[in-house]
Amino acid sequence: MLADGEVFEGEAIGATPSNGVASGEVVFNTVLSGYQEVITDPSYAGQIITFTVSHLGNYGISPDDNESRRPFCRGVVVRDLARRRSNWRAEDDLDGLLRTHGVPGITGIDTRRLTRHLRDAGAMPGAFGTADLATLTEAANVEPGTDGLDLVSTVTRDAPTTVASTGGGRRIVAFDFGIKATIIRHLAGLGEVTIVPASTSAFDVLAMEPDGVFLSNGPGDPGPLADVRTQIGALLGEVPVFGICLGHQLLAGTIGAETYKLPFGHHGGNHPVRNLATGAVEITSQNHNYCVAEGSIPTAELTHVNLNDQTVEGIRCLDVPAFSVQYHPEAGPGPHDSRYLFDEFEDLMARVRGTASGAMPGGVA
């Protein structure tokens, strides 16, 4: 049941929700594979994920593919759940993953119709379950969605964690706004990574003497995260900064940008993005509902643009060593076209390390 009255019928899968009702903001994702990575991405906190691919679960579940300690989404909607898995790596099936972590789901509905409706009407609150229609209708109507909520506090870790380097010699501090495991693996290729809770102060971060600071992906609306933006502001100019997804929105907001909510967001592994410096088109993995308003940051240049709707996909600060992208260059799941951005972070740290002030020569990152 959607908040605007649209009804879909199917069969319950996964965990049994409390009182027979699961609710959240209903969105759709267009990936053809990588359902485990999508479901375990903390950026989906507060949301019900509709998969547009018609057949899901055929290759099962492998613990190595989890992007976080558990799923934070409110539910999963699929057209056809595979009856059996077939993959030598699999240790469980999709229904088992949902049951283990308390995630309810629904299968057998017309996801094409649902997706077309969300594209026309926009992402919206909804509810599903085994309760009667009146109960589900009420649940959909009272579900707040994600607007104006601090969802980062529900997914971030409680204490710092250090991950050993698998290659480089850098010391990196990564803010956990809902950080994905694949991102951590890429950062560890540059050096030792200390992952800190979202509430960590700039003072504590600088005391760790990092070569660079990473701002991670995460769920929901960047608007309520004023305290986080304050800490980012204290870091800018002191240490190189690289942001992805919510981290991009928070960096942009720190330097004065406006953000707004997209009608149905960008969720999928096939979004074309143009690199304005090279002219190359990258096929990217994306997962966000909010976006940075173009032209709202006089102290940054636009570096990447989404070719589907011309929205801002990347910025580079002009007066401090910092840059960010809206999409996911780590691509878990998704294409690997944009993984060069981690090399650009290494290059930025290498250049800044040779300057006493922490600012780039000539004032350009």
Image (cartoon, grey):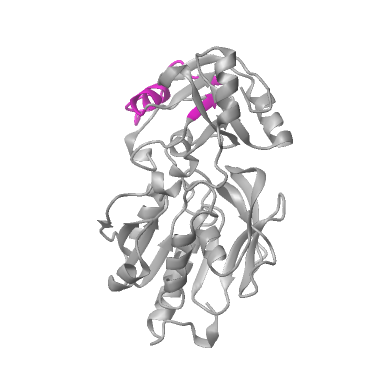
Horizontal and vertical percent position of residue 188: 33, 59
Left or right: 248, with 114 as reference point: left
Q: Which residue is at 47% across, 52% downward?
A: 217
Q: Residue 12: say if magenta.
A: no
Q: Which residue is at 59% across, 15% downward?
A: 134
Left or right: 326, with 60 as reference point: right
Image height of 57 relative to 121, above or below: above
Q: Residue 100: say if magenta.
A: yes
Image height of 61 relative to 228, above or below: above
Q: Which residues are magenta?
A: 75-101
In the picture as drawn, the residue positioned furthest to the right comes out as: 120
Q: Which residue is at 55% across, 32% downward?
A: 143
Horizontal and vertical percent position of residue 33: 51, 35
Task: State the quadrant of the N terminus.
Answer: top right
Horizontal and vertical percent position of residue 271: 63, 47
Q: Which residue is at 52% across, 68% downward?
A: 323
> Is residue 340 visible in the rendered structure shown here?
no
- Nearest to the observer: residue 268 or residue 10: 10
Horizontal and vertical percent position of residue 128: 54, 21
Count of numbered marks: 0
- Give the quadrant of residue 214: bottom left
Image height of 361 relative to 338, above or below: below
> Is residue 300 visible in the rendered structure shown here?
yes
Left or right: 307, with 328 as reference point: right
